[in-house]
Amino acid sequence: MTIYDIAKIAGVSASTVSRVANHKPGIKEETRKQIQALLEEYNYRPNETARGLVKQSSRMIGILITDIRYAHHVDIAYHIEQEVEKQGYCSLIVNTGLSDEKKVKAIEMLSQRRVDGVILVGSTFQCDAVREALAVCFPKEPVVITNGYVELPNVYGVLVDEREGMEASVRFMAKRGRRKLAFILPNRTPSNLSKEKGFIAAMEELGWSREQLWIYTAPTTLEDGRRITEQILEEHPDVEGMIFGEDLSAVGGMRVLLDRQIHVPGQVAVMGVDNSRYCDICYPKLTSLNNKMVEMSFEAARILLDGLEGRKNPEKIMLFSNIVEREST
């Protein structure tokens, strides 16, 4: 059933039906009620693609994440999608992978689909390749990066001070008598490198030199958490605490400690980062640095929607993390 079919049944013009369907003024109340009844009877819905062509708006936003298996980023995408849906926008969520080439292709694809704005989830999008692609594909549309930023006039960053958060995490461990600490870096994104800098700075406060520090790298999986924990225990059996850059690998690490009958937190304390759902479903429950995932999601959605309505925001907004203490420390 098209707008022309409704108009023929009602004995009015198609433009009159369009005005009623789009809640425009200037229609007699009796005519409006008649047309509205027909719209409801025939379950008429406006063609959003056609409306978008007229209004130069797709009512769609793009959300890019590098790995849809990573629950933390998926949760961010979920909260963003829920917020923009309230304002009548649908979301196109794209899994890009980690390579710059795939990130650029995803940005080009969103441009071809004429999305109204873009949110990039994670600091891994803070790179030259992405900046250049955005400058070409989205020179005016609002773009928001969670926990990252690239310098373009239409790009906004919602950042979390994870360096300060990691410094606080080391001090938190030290107050509990844990000074022989290992840090596990998930991968070398700007966000994770900021965590590493915080770990180094706080450990130097405790009297360690940079060369003495126990810093390891392992991807964010249960298996890699187990593997790196085995390595740490072999190389540093006197370790007193482990701080994982993300929660999931910390859960894998705790499994190794429990299997070896190393008491957590009695012998080795463990912390993660993200304050994710994993913290409450593992044993013991995991202490974690809360990097404000929910707040970051809402801020990213708000800033994007503001941009779509022509409202300005600061280029960068900084959120501050806090430690959520549970049983593992």
Image: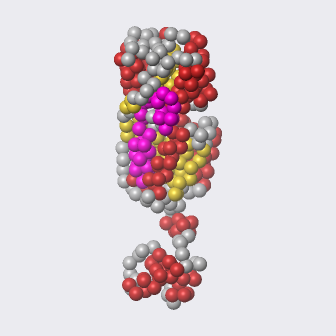
Q: Is residue 223 magenta?
A: no
Give how far across and how far down residue 138 sits, in percent. 52, 50
For the residue pair 300 and 256, the one nearer the viewer reads as 256
For the residue pair 6 and 228, the one nearer the viewer reads as 228
Give how far across and how far down residue 252 sits, in percent. 57, 27
For the residue pair 145 and 44, the one nearer the viewer reads as 44
Left or right: residue 204 versus residue 128 is left
* Residue for point 56% across, 53% down: 92
User: Is there any visible trace of residue 181 in the rendered image?
Assistant: no
| On screen, residue 49 above or below 179 | below
| On screen, residue 248 above or below 93 | above
User: Which quadrant, please, contains the C terminus?
Assistant: top left
User: Which quadrant, please, contains the N terminus?
Assistant: bottom right
| On screen, residue 180 above or below 151 | above
| On screen, residue 140 above or below 122 | below
Examine the image and state in which quarter residue 177 appears: top left
User: Is there any visible trace of residue 110 in the rendered image?
Assistant: yes
Give how far across and how far down residue 154 sits, in percent. 45, 47
- Which span of residues is magenta-colored? 277-305
For the residue pair 47 and 54, the one nearer the viewer reads as 47
Q: Is residue 294 magenta?
A: yes
* Residue for point 54% across, 11% down: 236
Q: Residue furthest bottom?
A: 11
Give how far across and how far down residue 204 sits, in percent. 41, 13
* Residue for point 53% across, 17% down: 262
